[in-house]
Structures are given as structure tokens and as C-alpha cells.
Amino acid sequence: MAVPVNQLGEPTVRAFVTAVNNGDRGAFEALLAPGATMSDDGTDRDVTEWTDKEIFSSGGHMDVESEASGGTELVVDYRNDTWGSMRTAWKFVVDGGKVTRFETGQA
């Protein structure tokens, strides 16, 4: 059973998922700390290039299955127009209301 986005425990992660699901690049970028980093399946990627390709230009959407570690770790049914649907794990490092790093990969 999915976790409603508005019930996610970490407010910054909740805003991150909301921005992704709304396709709101401005709100998404406002959540990232300067110099924020990310990785996909263990490989560091350029945040701007990756999010454009995997989220914003391909209709990315996150349906949260579960959360752990106070809301900074999610298991998500992630889908986009490029890859379809896949079960993914997301881990976030949040500092001062900003995401400094996020990691995603197959769950």
C-alpha cells in the first residue's frame, strides 16, 4: 500500500516528491543545496542533466511504497516515459531544509 505524499515524515523529502510528481522544476531546484550531488545505481551523475532526462523531460513520477530513517529513505515505484515503471530505493541527505545529496537505484 502506498504512502500518501502528504504523510511523508521528512518535510524536505515530501516537497521533493511533490515537485517531481508535479513536474515543477522550479520547486525542485529550490530544494537543492548549492553543489548538491546525486548518484544513480552507485554512479555519481550530474544533477541537472540527470534530473532533466530522468524526471522532467520524461514525465517522472514517484509512488512511495515505504519510508525509513525518519523519512530520508524511500522505496518507490518510479515511472517515466523512457523506462516505464521500476521499484527504486532513494536515500536523501537533508541539511537546513535543503537536499545536499540523493542516491537512487533499483530496489
Image (cartoon, rainbow, N blue to C red):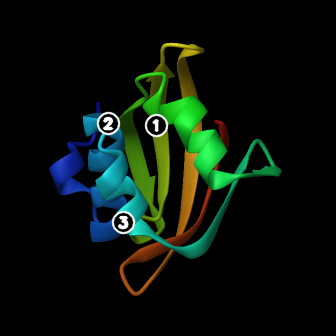
Q: CA distance from mark 1 to mark 3?
A: 22 Å
User: In this view of the protein, can residue 17 be seen by the observer?
Assistant: no
* Label 1 residue SS: strand
Picture quadrant of residue 61: top left
Instruction: Establish if 95 lies above or below 52.
Output: below
Q: Give the residue type at disc 3.
A: Ala
Question: In this view, which residue lies farthest toward the left?
Answer: 6
Rendered-image quadrant of the C terminus:
top right
> Residue at point 36% right, 42% down?
20
> Residue at point 23% right, 47% down?
5
Q: Give the residue type at disc 1.
A: Val
Q: Give the residue type at disc 2.
A: Gly
Q: Which residue is mark 1?
A: 76
**Mark with earlier residue (1, 2):** 2
Picture quadrant of residue 52: top right
Question: In this view, which residue lies farthest toward the bottom?
Answer: 96
- Left or right of residue 107: residue 1: left
Marks 3 & 2, CB-CB < 8 Å contact: no
Mark closer to the observer (1, 2):
2
Q: Which residue is mark 2?
A: 23
Q: Residues within 10 Å of mark 3 (few under 14, many from 20)?
A: few
User: In this view of the protein, can residue 104 be seen by the observer?
Assistant: yes
Q: Which residue is mark 3?
A: 30
